[in-house]
Image: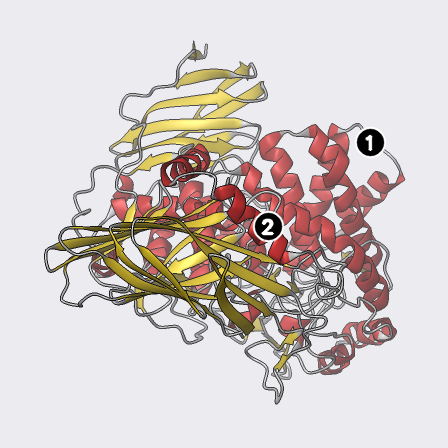
Amino acid sequence: MLKYLLLLALPIAGVAQNNQGLQLWYKTPATHFEEALPIGNGRIGAMVYGGITSDRLSLNEETLWSGGPVDAHMNPNAKNYLQPVREALFQENYRQADSLMKFMQGKYSESYMPLGNLLLDFKHGSDVTNYKRSLDIQRAVSTVSYDINGTQYKREYFVSYPDQVMVIKLSATGKDKLELDCRFNSLLIHHAAAGNNALTMKGFSPVHVEPNYRKSSNPIIQDTANAMRFVAKMQVLKSDGKQEWRDSTLHISHAKEVVLLVSMATSYNGIDKNPGTQGKNEMQIAGAYLTKAAGSNYDQLNNRHQADFRKYFDRVSFHLGDSNLTHLTTAERLQRFSQGHTDNGLIALYYQYSRYLMISSSRPGGIAANLQGIWNEELRAPWSSNFTTNINAEMNYWGVETGNLSEFHEPLLHLVEQLQRSGAVTAKDYYNCKGWVCNHNTDIWAMTNPVGAFGEGAANWASWPMGGVWLSTHLAEHYAFTGDKQFLASKALRVMEGAVQFCLDFLVDDKKGHLVTAPATSPENIYIIPATGYKGAVAYGTTADLAMIRQLFTDYLQLSKVMKLQGTMQQQVQTALDKLYPYQVGKKGNLQEWYYDWEDEDPRHRHLSHLFAAYPGNSITATGTPALADAVRKSLEIRTNDGTGWAITWRINLWARLQNGDKAYDALKKLLRFIGNESGIRMSGGGTYTNLFCAHPPFQIDGNFGGGAGIAEMLLQSHQGFVELLPALPKEWANGDVKGLCARGGFEVSMRWQEGQLKAAEIFSRNGGKLIVKNAGRQKEIETQAGKKYRIAF
């Protein structure tokens, strides 16, 4: 008989109810972006440098992009090349197929723009003692403090979601007072002025920006009539000193305390509105936020900010034993860890930092987190700081459900919904298919076409119509964790059905009677034909394509069953699912990436797309398909645990799914390699910057989110129809506790372990229903009631 207790309260002895050590801190100001500290409320963000004589806050607003509504009909003749490509492929003429794919490309995506900078120039000396720069990720407040000549200067920065402004508090305690100038600047076309008791900077985004990797004589195109407009406004909420408004500068003197408010807005009015001629009134929006916030004092603003942020952040607490290293700076701890020393407190901090970054960069009702979250300072940011859907955009949201931030999945799910309209045009114009499709890039305008500048791009990264398929699986994941049938009926099934329809139309028979994709690539990888040595990209029936389609079809059928739907579409999907080309094991014991057992040009390639079935998919599992899971293991061994930052995090998650905690931890150690300030592009050797941003290099935030997801996956899994506790616990994490992680089925898990053994576990059932719990070969089943908490005793 199962032994368990139905509890009215949830305390587990040893599970701390308050997060400790949740601070990044440094003894010197930041000199590079990769040292500055991020704050944000999902819509607006800033990087705090903490300079002494001059502090710089680089500013962003989530909707400030180049471009305007996309013309989805940019290459209506592309579909004319589909059949010639297929004929070349099935005649095994891969060179010709690669060549013909050049005609099936469109324009590049638009780019995420930096709004500008707020500079605070201080009129005091530079002989500083006791300098400290910090970011409290539980309070979402960045602080700078130091002493000069017997006076302590302190700055506090936060971005409030309830009030939609950045709040800055400056103070001087001692004999001297504050004297400073405040000013805006920007890399974009702009004008700054002081007037009406405010600093205002207005400007325009370019109408097009070429990707940073494309050589162009005119990479930035301006057209202020059609450009997106932006504004940043700053006003004084409180000052006990003197204020002088000088041209484009605010001068403050003789003050002991100053509170500043900063508001930002753009004219963005949706994916189908010209931001110049049909845009919103950005001045009115930014002014309204300031007016509303100005009705409160600093304490009221801070209290609302704290209540809002901690409502989400405090859902999870996580500890990995005692950590006595908080006296070291974050940079010192990162370097020490890179040298081989254990620092489990740093691991816990990194996990919670991933949750902090999500809350700060992707709020429900807003825009999805891009390649850099919301923090970007460059006009031509790496890879346009766009949404890259062949892994990166999805990876950003791998950890939201397990990390008890399910609401924060909404911006990505909304983006998927927006892709349908242009995606239907792309499906027809490029592939002669019904339904909708998205290729490997999109942007705030919901662009869905293959990129490559109409024939310039290489097929291994420009041609990949599975973005919509992968994104649609997130709809099913959200339902799996929440059980929200209204979401399922009103959005998920409808959007998924369009992606399913595309797949049904796009799939073709191979020579053996199986269904395959053609043309197909395996994102960014290159194969070698053994007979000829030809190195190519375009093929048919790639494992990644079929794994994603298999996942989508399976999810769609399961969700149809939940809603009691059974018709022609469901029958067609089941028939196609049964005909999909099966997974193949190569001569090395690995899961084949290609239809044939070909070698890769780069055996250690960063992408692991062919292993999608094991993570984030679940058509290959350690329990259900052990032979294929072993082939995944072999593929991982061949690929190694090295790679770019985000690529390493995929390895963490895959090793966790294979229940190999030590291999997952080895990948985590590589993720946390200290990179310093290196920001040039490299395709291997990723790690972590001083401010704990993930290094591709350069900075990409997907590695932070993927790394957090991987840590949670090592502790809790629920993809096999049961909840498994501590499935991939490495020996270094012998003792620990976690409160608030989430599992599929609507379960919230808290547990404590010692010497590698589970000691206590409690599970809250949000929706009721059967709960199967496993740990270390033991299994318990409970018929739960919604809203009840259960202590599990094996």
Where residue 138 sits: x, y (%)? Answer: 35, 40
For disc 2, the neighbor class at 10 Å (few under 14, some 14 to 19, many from 20) is many
User: CB under 8 Å between callouts 1 and 2?
Assistant: no
User: Which quarter of the rendered picture does the C terminus lie within?
Assistant: top left
Where residue 252 sits: x, y (%)? Answer: 32, 60
- Which image quadrant for residue 645? bottom left
Kind of residue at badge 2? Ala
- Which image quadrant for residue 29? bottom left
Residue under the point 49% across and 30% down: 723
Is 778 left or right of 505, judged from the image as shown? left
- Which residue is at the front of the view, 215 or 607? 215
In this view, 647 is above or below 721: below
So how many labels did they put on this image?
Answer: 2
Is 51 left or right of 495, judged from the image as shown? left
Kind of residue at badge 1? Leu
Residue under the point 32% across and 21% down: 12
Is 702 left or right of 182, judged from the image as shown? right
- Which residue is at the front of the view, 606 or 394? 394
Distance between mark 1 and mark 2 Cα atoms? 26 Å
Res. 591 in view = no
Secondary element at tag 2: loop
Q: How is the image coloured?
A: secondary structure
Which residue lies under the disc numbered 2? 613
Which residue lies under the disc numbered 1? 565
Residue under the point 63% across and 78% down: 529
Disc on the earlier residue, 1 or 2: 1
